[in-house]
Image (spheres, grey):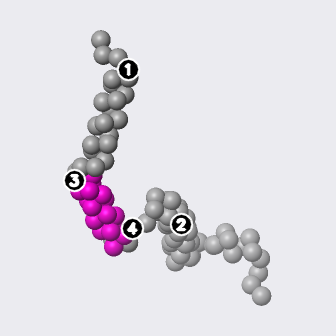
Amino acid sequence: MIKQNALDDLSRRLRELVASSPAQDVQRNVRAVVGSALQRMDLVTREEFDVQAAVLARTREKLEALEARVAGLERGTPDPQARAAGPAA
């Protein structure tokens, strides 16, 4: 059986070899290129997206309520919101 020290030493040497190899430079360059491309795309974070999705959902609800109110007014149905507000001044 291989001793733990030998495995640790081999692991350390492999990490050092990979860190000093051209593959590491390629990986850094690829990350830089991809990062730059993503910045140019003007993307938003997930949090910003979720906030805007919630705003859009509330706006849709208000629009649907207003559409229903207008449809009721066009049919001549009394507007329950107008009655609750009292007579117009």
Q: CA distance from mark 4 to mark 3?
A: 31 Å
Q: What residue appears at the point 33 percent right and 32 percent down from the top-left corner?
A: 11
Q: Residue 34 or 71: which is nearer the viewer?
A: 34
Residue on which the image places disc 4: 43
Q: Give the mark nearer the N terminus: 1 vs 4.
A: 1
Task: Kindly identify the amino acid type of the residue bearing the numbered disc 3.
Answer: Pro
Comparing labels 1 and 4, the label whose residue is closer to the camera: 1
User: Mark 3 falls on what kind of element?
Assistant: helix
User: Mark 2 falls on what kind of element?
Assistant: helix
Residue on which the image places disc 1: 4
Q: CA distance from mark 2 to mark 3?
A: 48 Å
Q: Which residues are magenta?
A: 24-40
Q: Is residue 29 magenta?
A: yes
The dot on residue 22 is: 3
Q: Is residue 36 magenta?
A: yes
**Tag 3: Cα neighbours inside 10 Å, few (<14), some, or many (≥20)?**
few
Q: Quadrant where the N terminus lies?
A: top left
Residue on which the image places disc 2: 55
In terms of image quadrants, where is residue 66?
A: bottom right
Determine if residue 78 is in view. yes
